[in-house]
Image (cartoon, rainbow, N blue to C red):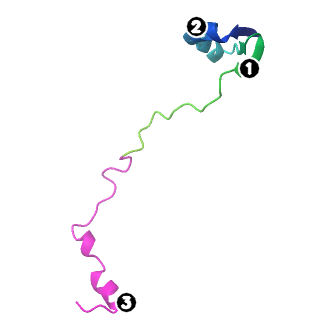
Amino acid sequence: MQTVNIHEAKTQLSKLIDQAVHGESFIIAKAGKPMVKVTKIDAPEPSSKKRLGFMQGQISTPKDFDEMGKAEIAKLLGWNN
């Protein structure tokens, strides 16, 4: 496994990350002392489907939605209309 010092890691970070993504982990050292190991993570691939609006056209909201059940609620709570 490759070991690089902090300065080298800063100057070649993009290249090192590409290597890690392709399975070549590396260690970053400070004054010759290993500090961290950089390796790729196995994150799930993002979904290609959009979730926002996925039921568009399948559900409709009544025009009087904000008034529905108003009388029943008032009766339950003891309010007088």
Tell how many labels.
3
Lateral position of residue 47 relative to residue 55, left or right: right
The magenta region covers 53-81
Residue 70 against residue 29 in the figure, above or below: below
Does the magenta run of residues contain 58? yes
Query: What is the C-alpha distance between the residues marked 1 and 2?
Result: 17 Å
Lateral position of residue 66 relative to residue 35, left or right: left
Which label lies toward us, 3 or 2? 2
Which label lies toward us, 3 or 1? 1
Which residue appears at 37% of the width and 89% of the height?
76
The residue carrying mark 3 is 76
Can you tell which quarter of the image residue 52 is in?
top left
Of marks 3 and 2, which one's residue comes earlier in the chain? Answer: 2
Type of secondary structure dominating the magenta stretch: loop
Which residue appears at 25% of the width and 92% of the height?
80
Query: What is the C-alpha distance between the residues marked 3 and 1?
Result: 66 Å
- Where in the figure is residue 61, as x and y percent of width and height? 28, 63
The residue carrying mark 2 is 12
The residue carrying mark 1 is 35
Which residue appears at 77% of the width and 16% of the height?
34
Q: Which quarter of the rendered picture does the C terminus lie within?
A: bottom left
Does the magenta run of residues contain 51? no
- Where in the figure is residue 21, as x and y percent of width and height? 62, 17
Query: What is the C-alpha distance between the residues marked 3 and 2?
Result: 69 Å
**Disc 3: CA contacts within 10 A as few (<14), some (14-19) or many (>=20):** few
Secondary structure found at label 3: helix
User: Disc 2 marks which amino acid?
Assistant: Gln
Of marks 3 and 1, which one's residue comes earlier in the chain? Answer: 1
Which label lies toward us, 1 or 2? 1
Lateral position of residue 68 relative to residue 23, left or right: left
